[in-house]
Image (cartoon, rainbow, N blue to C red):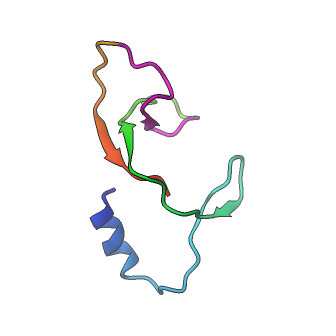
Amino acid sequence: MTVKELIEQLQTLDPDLRVFVSGYEGGYNDAGPISGVRDIVLEYHKGTWYYGLHEEVGVYDLGPSHSFEIVKGIIL
């Protein structure tokens, strides 16, 4: 999802709705402030159901010949 797509979806909602994110093992937490722009490796965990699909650059060593796409993004 892009920021533009997120804004379009948010504009259809009541601006006083609360925003939550999933908790670690269940439940929900209040969404925190938007983090700074980060480099994100797309589909790093493809095929691994227990991780999120994407990963932040620097968490794992990609090696010199990685074939992953890296994009700029924010984390809510």
Q: Is residue 44 or residue 33 the one in the foreground?
A: 33
Q: Quadrant of residue 23?
A: bottom right
Residue at 46% in and 28% down: 58
Residue at 30% in and 58% down: 2
Q: Residue 12, image x and y in percent?
A: 37, 82
Magenta stretch, overall SS: loop
Residue at 28% in and 21% down: 67
The relative height of residue 37 versus residue 44 in the rendered view (above or below) is: below
Q: Quadrant of residue 50?
A: top right
Residue at 42% in and 32% down: 57
Q: How many marks?
A: 0
Q: Residue furthest top?
A: 64
- Image quarter where the N terminus lies is bottom left
Q: Residue 72, image x and y in percent?
A: 32, 45
Judge whether residue 56 is colored magenta: yes
Q: Which residues are magenta?
A: 50-63
Q: Residue 25, image x and y in percent?
A: 72, 47
Residue 32 lies left or right of residue 56; in this view the side is right
Q: Residue 7, image x and y in percent?
A: 34, 72
The relative height of residue 18 versus residue 2 in the rendered view (above or below) is: below
